[in-house]
Amino acid sequence: MKEKLIINKKSLKGEDGYKTFSIRIKDETVSKLDELAKETNRSRNELINILLDYAMNNCEVK
């Protein structure tokens, strides 16, 4: 009796705990992100997530 090939379903986009969406960013901010990305060897996406996490954990609403 031959063993069956098991193929697991692939997760749909967005089901990995991340969501994709578009935002508008000033050219100056993109330039700063690009400089930081080059300096740290990280992608823009990684940096944006790091910066957003920091901001969310360190902001106060008054």
Image: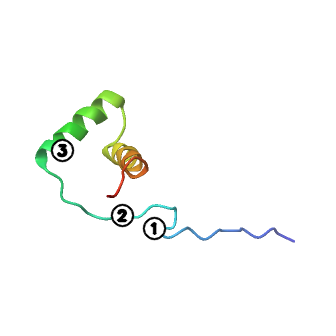
Instruction: Find residue 20 and name its label.
Output: 2
Residue 52 x, y percent position in the rendering: 36, 50
Q: CA distance from mark 3 to mark 1?
A: 27 Å
Describe residue 42's horizontal placement relative to residue 3 as left or right.
left
Q: Which residue is mark 3?
A: 29
Q: Secondary structure at mark 3?
A: helix
What amino acid is at disc 1? Answer: Lys
Task: Report the residue that reaches farthest toward the right.
Answer: 1
Task: Report the residue that reaches farthest toward the front.
Answer: 62
Q: Residues within 10 Å of mark 3 (few under 14, many from 20)?
A: few
Residue 19 x, y percent position in the rendering: 41, 64
Residue at 31% across / 44% down in the picture? Answer: 44
What amino acid is at disc 2? Answer: Thr
Q: Quadrant location of the N terminus?
A: bottom right
Are the residues at dot 3 and dot 1 in contact (C-beta closer than 8 Å)?
A: no
The answer to which quarter of the image holds residue 32 is top left
Q: Where 21 sits versus 34, above or below?
A: below
Residue 59 x, y percent position in the rendering: 36, 50
Near-viewer residue (32 or 4): 32
Near-viewer residue (48 or 38): 48
Q: Which residue is mark 1?
A: 13
